[in-house]
């Protein structure tokens, strides 16, 4: 059973006794960041009885940095491993065995806990008598500082779930770090991380937790900040996807998780995990597939096809339309094909590129793969119509112009009757909206066209005075139809205008404007304003 939790008055008394929580911080060759992680744990206040830092045989000074901190922080205990474990599971298990608090939480050395995180989790655990409490996490893109909520639908409001099967969507959050665990519960069910070189060990740990059917509380409070450093010399496991072995490890972690659910008799959780794999994991890797070499693509396709062959049709059918269509194309073709089209379909929101084919009046993927039917192709909210909108930017000294073409899709869009299109800029780092541009759509062949002017000076003026670099803006489209249907889509970047321009501006003196295509092919803009910012960016490029 799931119940909504009534919010506590902020002025009411706290329910939290002191020193109940042990925080386990794991680190390997991360001297530059581990201090910030440990200090964020110590700063949680008197609810934290100890911080246990496990140094996994680092060779870069991480151990010395932790020892220096421990000299002035009595609550900090440091464990030095003599051999590197090769993964995250073993040092976490070491910390868990050493913990003495009633509750335990995990923290990675390159992340931080926001103020009040542990207190919020512990309050909920005690108030709801829940051995597991989960809170909101954000992925913070560095150095830009943009926060992207992780699985936000799970943490919009406080709730209590009598067991995970009352809310099987909980399997979509495979993180172990945005949760507080009762150690007695973990010990009673012998729940530990996989040892050694096991990538995506948190998938397995989380599956073991959910399979034990605890009472789970979720809270909307932000409890974890996951730092994403895409430009780092050594990428984190979640970002280091250039080797196909990473995908193989992800498949193995997912396979193990599903087996745990099935062995525990949690069929609904196993079903939800398979659906999540299609909706999230499969789409994420397909979006990047066109950037990989031929050998990677061939091996990725073979691994994926072999794995998906074992999925139940009910699991595939339960996935969102883009994911299940991608899965069926992979299963139907023995070799990689239609990668540009698959990449666009894997985007969020998905775009289905022409050409479009039909078989006996049914929409199908292509003439060559007629067995891949595009089922549930509707304009309803359950499966958003994956409409494709091409956008060719034309940037001149006078203005920014987008030449748009909205493609028809098996007659579905014509039936709705498109009449106008809005272009909505959103500043990437905080989702702040920019000025909306609206224009009418004109029928043109198998689709509709429009030209939309962008107020580049106004967008640059909303940059917030950031001089460190150009400000990225994403561009979303909203198509309004005569029958009341509203469709949202990203724009597909096309044409020769995807290049940097420096423009004179009455308002800013100079504007640097760069339309570009994201990894998924969507159109975005980078903007910088003022002579100082523009020249600083130019000088940085010259120094490279």
Image: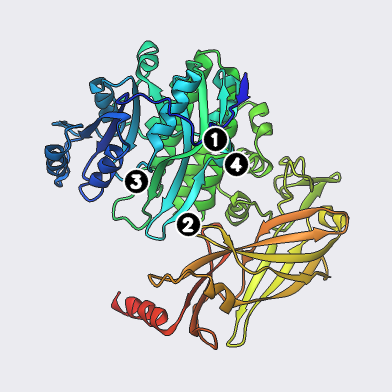
SS of the residue at dot 4?
Answer: helix
Label placed on residue 236: 3
Where residue 210 appears, as percent x and y from the top left, is 49, 21
- Residue 525 visible from this viewpoint: yes
* Dot 4 or dot 2, earlier in sequence: 2
> Of circles 1 and 2, which is in front?
1
For the residue carrying disc 3, how many other residues have a C-alpha within 10 Å: few (<14), some (14-19), or many (20+)?
A: some
Identify the residue under disc 1: 277
Q: Give the spatial CA distance, label 4 vs label 2.
A: 18 Å
Q: Residue at x 60, y 51 (%)?
A: 348
Q: Give the spatial CA distance, label 2 vs label 3.
A: 19 Å
For the residue carrying disc 2, how many other residues have a C-alpha within 10 Å: few (<14), some (14-19), or many (20+)?
A: some
Where residue 322 appears, as percent x and y from the top left, is 65, 45
**What residue occupies the far top of the structure in this picture?**
188
Q: Give the spatial CA distance, label 4 vs label 1.
A: 14 Å
Q: Quadrant of residue 111?
A: top left
SS of the residue at dot 1?
Answer: helix
Q: Residue at x 49, y 37 (%)?
A: 303
SS of the residue at dot 2?
Answer: loop
* Dot 2 or dot 3, earlier in sequence: 3
């Amino acid at each position: 059973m799931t119940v909504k939790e009534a919010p506590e008055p902020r002025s009411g008394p706290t329910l939290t006794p002191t020193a109940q929580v042990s925080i386990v911080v794991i680190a390997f060759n991360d001297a530059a960041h581990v201090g910030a992680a440990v200090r964020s744990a110590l700063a949680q206040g008197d609810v934290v009885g100890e911080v246990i830092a496990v140094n996994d045989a680092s060779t870069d000074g991480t151990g010395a940095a932790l020892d220096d901190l421990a000299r002035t922080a009595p609550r900090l205990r440091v464990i030095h491993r003599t051999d590197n474990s090769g993964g995250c599971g073993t040092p976490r298990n070491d910390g868990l065995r050493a913990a003495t608090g009633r509750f335990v939480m995990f923290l990675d050395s390159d992340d931080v806990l926001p103020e009040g995180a542990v207190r919020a989790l512990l309050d909920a655990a005690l108030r709801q008598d829940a051995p597991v409490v989960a809170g909101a996490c954000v992925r913070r893109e560095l150095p830009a500082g943009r926060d992207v909520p992780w699985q936000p639908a799970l943490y919009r409001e406080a709730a209590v779930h009598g067991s995970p099967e009352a809310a099987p969507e909980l399997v979509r959050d495979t993180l172990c770090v945005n949760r507080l665990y009762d150690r007695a519960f973990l010990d009673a069910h012998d729940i530990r991380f996989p040892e050694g070189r096991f990538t995506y060990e948190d998938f397995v740990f989380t599956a073991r937790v959910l399979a034990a059917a605890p009472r789970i509380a979720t809270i909307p409070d932000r409890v974890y900040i996951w730092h994403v450093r895409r430009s780092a010399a050594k990428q984190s496991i979640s970002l280091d996807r250039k080797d196909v072995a990473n995908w193989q490890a992800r498949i193995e972690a997912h396979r193990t998780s599903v087996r745990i659910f099935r062995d525990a008799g949690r069929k609904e959780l196993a079903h939800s995990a398979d659906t999540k794999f299609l909706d999230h994991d499969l789409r994420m890797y397909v979006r990047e597939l066109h950037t990989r070499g031929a050998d990677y693509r061939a091996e990725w396709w073979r691994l994926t096809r072999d794995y998906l062959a074992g999925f139940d049709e009910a699991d595939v059918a339960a996935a969102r339309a883009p994911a299940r269509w991608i899965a069926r194309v992979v299963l139907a073709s023995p070799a990689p094909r239609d990668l540009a089209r698959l990449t666009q379909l894997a985007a969020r929101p998905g775009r289905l590129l022409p050409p479009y084919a039909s078989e006996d009046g049914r929409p199908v993927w292509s003439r060559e793969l007629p067995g891949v039917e595009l089922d549930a192709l509707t304009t309803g909210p359950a499966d958003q119509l994956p409409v494709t909108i091409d956008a060719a930017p034309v940037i001149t000294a006078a203005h920014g112009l987008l030449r748009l073409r909205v493609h028809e899709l098996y007659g579905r869009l014509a039936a709705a009757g498109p009449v106008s299109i809005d272009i909505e800029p959103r500043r990437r780092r905080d989702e702040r909206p920019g000025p909306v541009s609206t224009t009418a759509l004109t029928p043109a062949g198998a689709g509709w066209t429009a030209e939309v002017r962008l107020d580049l000076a106004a967008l640059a003026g909303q940059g917030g005075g950031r001089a460190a670099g150009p400000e990225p803006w994403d561009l979303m489209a909203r198509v309004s139809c005569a029958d009341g249907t509203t469709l949202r889509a990203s724009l597909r970047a096309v044409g020769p205008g995807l290049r940097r321009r420096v423009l004179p501006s009455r308002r800013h003196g100079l504007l640097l404007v760069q339309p570009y295509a994201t990894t998924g092919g969507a159109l975005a803009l980078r903007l910088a304003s003022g002579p100082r910012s523009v020249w600083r960016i130019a000088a940085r490029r010259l120094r490279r």
